[in-house]
């Protein structure tokens, strides 16, 4: 069983992680790129190696950001869907007069 507030907290954590990754994960990108170009232009093999690390980091960071966004969006959708499902079930538990039926009263309909 999962409660709505738990889904909300998890979704918020995923969103906050994505936001922090977007900023903090990109912090060194400009200087790393500049260093790799400078090293390469100076004829050092470490320049191209650093550029490969730079590109791999960016690719992995983008994948992680997308995963966090997917988790956050999925949990938001799940919360909304559960809310609709609960409303549908509650609506179905009323009799023709609009009175909420008890479990024992519902059982009468199945017998």
Image: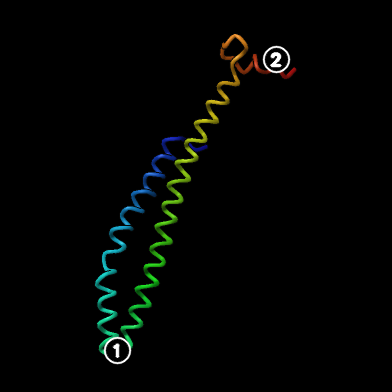
**Residue 55 sits in which quadrant?**
bottom left
Residue 52 percent across, percent down from the top left: 38, 77
What kind of element bears circle 2?
helix
Q: Position of residue 76 (x, y in %)?
A: 45, 41
Q: Is 58 or 6 nearer to us in this picture? A: 58
50 sits left or right of 77 in the view = left
Find residue 4 and report its image quarter: top left
Whether residue 61 sits left or right of residue 79 in the image: it is: left
Q: CA distance from mark 2 to mark 1?
A: 83 Å
Q: Residue at x 34, y 73 (%)?
A: 54
Whether residue 60 is situated above or below residue 88 in the rendered picture: below
Look at the numbered disc 1 and give the secondary structure of its residue: loop
- Circle 1 residues within 10 Å: few <14, some 14–19, many ≥20: few
Q: Are marks 2 and 1 in contact (CB under 8 Å)?
A: no
Residue at 36% in and 53% down: 18
What is the number of the mark on residue 84?
none
**Mark 2 / mark 1, whichever is N-terminal:** 1
The image quadrant where one finds the C terminus is: top right
Quadrant of the image occupied by residue 45: bottom left
Measured as percent of width and height from the top left, residue 67 is found at 44, 55
**Residue 108 numbered tag:** 2
Residue furthest top in the image: 97
78 to 60, vertically: above or below: above
Measuring 52% from the left and 30% from the top, which residue is drawn there?
84
Label 2, residues with CA under 10 Å away: few <14, some 14-19, many ≥20: few
Q: Please count the marks in the image.
A: 2
Where does the image place residue 69, in percent across and percent down from the top left? 42, 51
Q: Is residue 2 above or below residue 21?
A: above
- Which residue is drawn at the image coordinates 72% and 19% (left, top)? 110
Considering every residue shown, the one lying at the far right of the view is 111
Per the rendering, the mark at residue 44 is 1
Look at discs 2 and 1 and give the one toward the viewer. Answer: 1
């Amino acid at each position: 069983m999962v409660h709505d507030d738990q889904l909300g907290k998890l979704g918020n954590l995923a969103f906050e992680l994505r936001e922090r990754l977007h900023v903090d994960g990109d912090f060194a990108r400009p200087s790393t790129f500049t260093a790799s170009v400078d090293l390469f232009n100076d004829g050092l093999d470490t320049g191209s190696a650093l550029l490969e690390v730079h590109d791999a980091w960016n690719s992995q960071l983008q994948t992680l950001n997308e995963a966090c966004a997917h988790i956050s969006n999925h949990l938001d959708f799940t919360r909304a869907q559960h809310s609709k499902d609960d409303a549908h079930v509650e609506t179905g538990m009323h009799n023709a007069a609009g009175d909420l039926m008890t479990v024992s009263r519902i059982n009468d309909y199945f017998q």
